[in-house]
Image: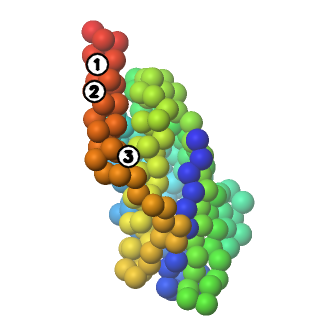
């Protein structure tokens, strides 16, 4: 499952790069992050508490920066283990391009889940993961520069239809979860 987006941040690329590597900034912006520790220049350890559909878990997460080309780009790879709930692993390719108005941050990420988490259903997991990624990059760019904004906004679906479909999916998942755990 792939997720992507881009944001305009109205500060120089070098400053954005430094924020992308700062543990305090990352901890403040990662949804559900309870702790984040920098182990080395290119390795972090985090504890993240997430809810995806009916599944709640705390993930022990290892993050590694690969293929760093300061201050242009890097690949962030991560593996999170949530005990009996399952695991998640994936990557985010992040690039920073200079723009006349500041810096354009682009990301493309992909992930996989396993264990009970995979039983939740790919649409729900994709939706939740997309929201987590969007929330992270939105918080991050706002933390760096309060005037930053997403560049690739897509039209939103009808709220009543989306809400109705979401409620039906959650009811089906709750019934499935109850039957499987009982």
Which residue bears the numbered disc 3? 48
Q: Is residue 179 left or right of residue 83?
A: left
Residue 2 in the image, given as x and y percentages of width and height: 59, 47
Q: Residue at x 71, y 69 (%)?
A: 69
Q: Residue at x 47, y 35 (%)?
A: 123
Asked if disc 2 and disc 1 are in contact, CB closer than 8 Å, the reply is yes
Q: Which mark is drawn over residue 171?
A: 2
Name the secondary structure under disc 3: strand
Dot in front, 1 or 3:
1
Q: Residue at x 29, y 43 (%)?
A: 163
Above/below status of 80 relative to 119: below
Mark 3–mark 2 Cα distance, whole angstroms, equals 26 Å
Report the quarter where the N terminus lies. Answer: top right
Q: Which mark is drawn over residue 76?
A: none
Residue 62 in the image, given as x and y percentages of width and height: 52, 46
Above/below status of 140 relative to 10: above
Check the image and name the residue furthest to the bottom. Answer: 100
Nearest to N terminus: mark 3 or mark 2: 3
Q: Is residue 124 visible?
A: yes
Asked if disc 3 and disc 2 are in contact, CB closer than 8 Å, the reply is no
In front of the other: 46 or 147: 147
Name the secondary structure under disc 2: helix
Residue 95 in the image, given as x and y percentages of width and height: 64, 68
Nearest to N terminus: mark 1 or mark 3: 3
In front of the other: 39 or 51: 51
Q: Residue at x 38, y 73 (%)?
A: 143
Residue 169 in the image, given as x and y percentages of width and height: 34, 31
Name the secondary structure under disc 1: helix
Mark 2–mark 1 Cα distance, whole angstroms, equals 6 Å
């Amino acid at each position: 499952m792939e997720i992507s987006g881009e944001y305009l941040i109205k500060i120089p690329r070098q400053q954005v790069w430094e924020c992308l590597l700062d543990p305090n900034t990352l901890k403040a912006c990662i949804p559900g992050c309870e702790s984040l520790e920098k182990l080395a220049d290119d390795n972090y350890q985090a504890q993240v508490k997430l809810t995806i559909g009916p599944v709640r878990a705390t993930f022990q997460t290892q993050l590694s920066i690969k293929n760093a080309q300061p201050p242009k780009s890097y690949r962030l790879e991560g593996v999170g283990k949530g005990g009996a709930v399952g695991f998640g692993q994936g990557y985010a390719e992040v690039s920073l391009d200079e723009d006349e108005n500041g810096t354009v941050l682009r990301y493309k990420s992909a992930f996989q889940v396993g264990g009970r988490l995979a039983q939740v259903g790919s649409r729900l997991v994709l939706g939740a993961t997309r929201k987590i990624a969007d929330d992270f990059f939105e918080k991050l760019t706002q933390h760096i520069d309060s005037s930053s904004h997403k560049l690739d906004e897509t039209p939103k679906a009808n709220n009543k239809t989306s809400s109705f479909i979401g409620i039906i999916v959650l009811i089906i998942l709750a019934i499935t979860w109850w039957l499987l755990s009982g």
